[in-house]
Image (tube, grey):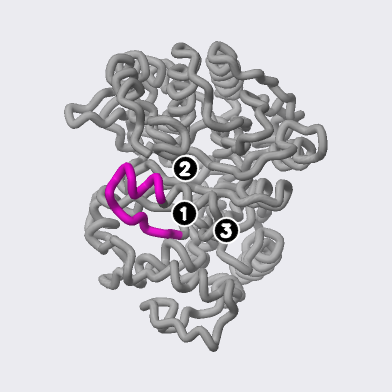
Amino acid sequence: MPAPSEFLQFIDSNADGFIQRLSDAVAIPSISGDPVHRQDVVKMANWLNGQLKSYGVHTQLVDLGKHTMDGQELSLPPAILGRIGTDPTKKTVLIYGHFDVQPANKSDGWDTDPFTLVVHEDGRLIGRGSSDDKGPILGWLNVLQYHHQNNKELPLNIRFCFEGMEESGSEGLDDLVRKESQPGGWFNGVDCVCIVRPDPCNMVSLFEEYPQSDNYWLNTRTPALTYGLRGLAYFKLTISGPARDLHSGVFGRTVHEPMTDLIALMSKLVDVSGKILIPGVDEMVEPPTESEKYGFVDPSNVSELQLTILSRAIYERLDYSVTDVEESAGGQIALSASKVDVLMGRMRYPSLSLHGIEGAFSGAGAKTVIPAKVSGKFSIRLVPPQTPELVEPLVIQYLTSEFAKLKSKNMFSIENLHGGKPWMADHKHWNFEAAKIATRAVYNQEPDLTREGGSIPVTLTFAESLGVNVLLLPMGRGDDGA
């Protein structure tokens, strides 16, 4: 069903207001992973809560307790629960999104201030959170505004769950979801879940253009529906020794240097081809068959569920190329010239990435310090049957063994900061079928069915706690970075 013309006119006439609202949201640096910005995350929660209430949503700010970050005890930002519509004859959809963001600085490669929304000449809205995930959340506000101001009845009941810790492992949210899924809870009676990333300025009525999810298209051409996500295990490896930072002119080649040990260990985690060097991690995952890679499936050799998955997860048929990944990355740096190998590296296999080093000199100039304590951060993206609980002991055992080989007098420790299990859904469920119909109607294209390389920890919790289908509908293009 096409969107009503009056709704499209509403979008056109209110576009400037939508963009200004997004600008206001982007300006709040709600960085959940930085204790300095914890109050900004709380500020963002209060701002969003006020917006929802202004359009008739009954809300509750939920205290999630406390946690420890970098040795500091902090209050977790509140989650927002919302409810609008109680008609028992209508479907009830739970919408999830997050209002926290990743850190961002101009020095990271941004052309503009990340927390000042910029309207590019080609129409793109550039700012931290504009795609992940403030813009998508505000898309729902735009829809609610239309129905509220025009006294239009929503075509379904909606429950909202918005959090401020997604970028830091969704701490505190799993317990909340399990509690509210019980009889009498906010989520009791939900028929399906949609992880949202709707376009804040190009939304049409619910189930006419279905809102979209916390992941991305493979490219800039073809819409996608996502039925699988990789999990995550995020580690912090710390080496310490001296009582204070030392001068290299005095102590160079006279003491065991923590940075030297750390670099040696980090170099043992993954090779330049992407192969994970920790014994047992890659080996957990069964190698693909030729039929899985190229779509020639023999029904006699697989179960019905496996057949369904394999027949849809055909990497060769997806609208994707090595050029796409290199254009998205901004450089000709793909690990393989094979489209199938690149797709499997993103969707089917685990990956290990090195993210940064704390405690090391990184400023301008040439400081000749030997740091007393340094920490390296890395993560492993997980695929079935891997879980953080299965991978963590392998990581600890391997790095402990490798550190012993260094015969260093420094001290070594490793910490699992956070993690989440991988997830897969039935893409033949009516939830996905509705999304397919809507995608065809809006884009005049058949959507790609994909497994995404990223992680949304709470997805599996929703699926297991509610026992309903969870849908991810990507709005973000393959070249989004915000």
Residue kind at label 1, given as amino acid type: Thr
249 above or below 331?
above
Residue kind at label 2, given as amino acid type: Ser
Residue at image mark 1: 226
283 above or below 415?
below
Sort mark 1 into few (<14), some (14-19) or many (20+) by Cα contacts within 10 Å. Answer: many
Residue furthest left in the image: 121
> Which of the two discs, 2 and 3, labels the residue nearer the N terminus?
2
Q: Which residues are magenta?
A: 437-450
Residue at image mark 2: 213
> CA separation, marks 2 and 3?
14 Å
Residue at image mark 3: 425
- Pointer 2 and pointer 1: residues touching (CB < 8 Å)? yes
Q: Position of residue 85 (x, y in %)?
A: 63, 25
Say if the magenta span includes residue 441. yes
6 above or below 363?
above
Residue furthest front in the image: 89
Left/right placement of residue 292 relative to residue 261 reads left
> CA separation, marks 2 and 1?
8 Å
Residue kind at label 3, given as amino acid type: Ala
What secondary structure is marked by label 2? strand
Say if the magenta span includes residue 252. no
Q: In the image, what residue occupies the spot 49% across and 32% down?
A: 101
Left/right placement of residue 28 relative to residue 328 reads right
> Which of the two discs, 3 and 1, labels the residue nearer the N terminus?
1
Q: In the image, what residue occupies the spot 57% across and 23% down?
A: 41
> Which of the two discs, 2 and 1, labels the residue nearer the N terminus?
2
What secondary structure is marked by label 1? strand
20 above or below 91?
above
